[in-house]
Image (cartoon, rainbow, N blue to C red):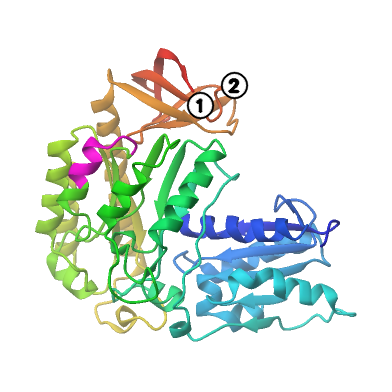
């Protein structure tokens, strides 16, 4: 036990990383460590890295310097996707003591206890404990609590897809799933702590059920998972995070439309509106299927929020390909975009492809799509004016306002009131503010 030792965490990247950081943090707390904010002085700083982040190495070095500023004598450990892909690069960063790969990160407390038990501390190159990614074939369940109003519940890890731009299979290994029993227990545990919204997360959650008991076949489907979670008592809201269009089946969309707890919000990666580019990316669908999915959602949930991931500047993307994507998205009834500027990743087929798009053009295309996203979100918000929604308020005071999200992911704000934190309140959306948020009038009293 280390009652006097303090540990701090910094998470880069996706909801999945946040769920795993929270689980690792609980393992430290279980051994008597005190968790503090990363800006405070700590004895151990843990950085959960991301391989998708642009300039990942530069970002990592900045965070290490922040840790050293907090306590020059602290231990600094790196885990996560970038730690698996480039362990020795991270270990060479001044101040880093420990780098753990995909199979080792959940054993972090053991490695830290070993470092703390040594009589003298030597500075220099950090220790690396990594693995061949083929060894990352087991599942560790995770969920985040305490950091945000919503909890991120990991249901799946890894990916068997071979998209030509992506390093995630190299960083996280094969597709594998938590057992249905364990997911339901974790959801019940989260709900018991008064958390009102759970976001399902994973690398490829539509592939849920594969590797559930260590084998490659599906024991359960994603639809079976959704139906089972909908029956868990005490959960107010369930939200599906990013799901591949080919794995989002019509049966799932129909079920969500009638669900007790699942909210009308979908985030569906597109990556390109050009079939030629989709083929070069080795995506498992064409643009026609994407149109069908959006149409199906609109048919049964007219007020649903639909978010889209798109990559600009992929090798071989001509002006014609990009305009095909732009017009495709402009005509599609969607709500917002997450725009990613393509960046080369080592050991991916795309990095060796011809037709490299100059960075200046990539940035210009990115700016155009981000502008389209603003237009799409504004139009979606305008379509919601006058409707009655339920908002879940979050816990942060931002310049005198409290913010929250409706079930269909409209962001609203109200004057700061601590009594509203983590409450559900019926509202009528009345006006779009100058910063793009929605004002409202209260429809009913706060819902418990």
**Marks 2 and 1 close (CB-CB < 8 Å):** yes
Q: Residue at x 34, y 63 (%)?
A: 204
Q: Residue at x 58, y 80 (%)?
A: 87
The question of residue 257 being in magenta is answered with yes
The answer to whether any part of residue 253 appears in the image is yes
The question of residue 212 being in magenta is answered with no
Front-most of residues 40 and 115? 115
Q: Secondary structure at mark 1?
A: loop
Identify the residue under disc 1: 423
Q: Residue at x 62, y 58 (%)?
A: 10
Q: Residues within 10 Å of mark 1 (few under 14, many from 20)?
A: some
From this view, report whether residue 378 is shown above or below residue 168.
Answer: above
From this view, report whether residue 69 is shown above or below residue 295.
Answer: below
Q: Which residues are magenta?
A: 253-261
The answer to whether any part of residue 332 appears in the image is no
Q: Residues within 10 Å of mark 2 (few under 14, many from 20)?
A: few
- To which quarter of the image does residue 437 belong? top left
Identify the residue under disc 2: 419
- To which quarter of the image does residue 221 belong? bottom left
Front-most of residues 45 and 435? 45
Question: What is the chief secondary structure element of the magenta stretch?
Answer: helix
């Amino acid at each position: 036990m280390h009652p006097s030792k303090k540990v701090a965490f910094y998470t880069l990247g996706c909801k999945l990383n946040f769920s795993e950081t929270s689980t690792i943090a609980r393992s430290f707390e279980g051994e008597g460590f005190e968790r503090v904010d990363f800006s405070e002085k700590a004895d151990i700083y843990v950085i959960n890295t991301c391989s998708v982040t642009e300039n990942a190495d530069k970002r990592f070095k900045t965070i290490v310097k922040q840790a050293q500023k907090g306590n020059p004598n602290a231990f600094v450990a790196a885990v996560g996707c970038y730690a698996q892909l480039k362990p020795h690069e991270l270990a060479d960063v001044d101040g880093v003591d420990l780098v753990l790969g995909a199979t080792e990160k959940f054993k972090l407390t053991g490695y830290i206890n070993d470092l703390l038990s040594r009589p003298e501390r030597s500075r220099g190159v950090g220790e690396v404990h990594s693995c061949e990614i083929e060894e990352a074939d087991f599942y560790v369940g995770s969920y985040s609590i305490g950091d945000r109003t919503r909890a991120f519940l990991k249901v799946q890890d890894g990916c068997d897809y071979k998209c030509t731009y992506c390093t995630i299979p190299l960083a996280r290994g094969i597709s594998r799933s938590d057992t249905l029993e364990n997911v339901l227990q974790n959801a019940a545990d989260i709900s018991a702590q008064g958390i009102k919204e759970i976001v399902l997360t994973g690398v490829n959650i539509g592939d849920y059920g594969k590797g559930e008991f260590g084998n490659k076949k599906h024991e359960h489907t994603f639809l079976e998972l959704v139906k089972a979670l909908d029956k868990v008592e005490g959960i107010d809201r369930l939200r599906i995070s990013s799901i591949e269009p080919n794995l989002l089946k019509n049966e799932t969309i129909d079920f969500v439309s009638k669900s007790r707890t699942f909210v009308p919000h979908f985030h569906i990666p597109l990556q390109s509106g050009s079939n030629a580019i989709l083929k070069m990316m080795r995506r498992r669908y064409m643009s026609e299927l994407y149109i069908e999915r959006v149409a199906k959602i609109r048919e049964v949930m007219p007020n649903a929020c639909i978010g889209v991931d798109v990559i600009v500047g992929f090798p071989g993307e001509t002006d014609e390909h990009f305009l095909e994507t732009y017009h495709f998205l402009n005509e599609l009834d969607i709500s917002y975009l997450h725009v990613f500027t393509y960046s080369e990743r080592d050991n991916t087929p795309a990095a060796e492809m011809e037709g490299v798009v100059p960075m200046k053009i990539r940035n210009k295309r990115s700016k155009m799509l981000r502008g389209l996203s603003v237009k799409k979100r504004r139009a979606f918000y305008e379509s919601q004016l006058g409707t009655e929604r339920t908002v879940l308020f979050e816990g942060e005071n931002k310049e005198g306002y409290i913010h929250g999200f409706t079930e269909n992911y409209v962001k609203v704000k109200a004057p700061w009131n601590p009594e509203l934190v983590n409450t559900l309140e019926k509202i009528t959306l009345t006006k779009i503010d100058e910063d793009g948020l929605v004002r409202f009038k209260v429809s009913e009293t706060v819902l418990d």
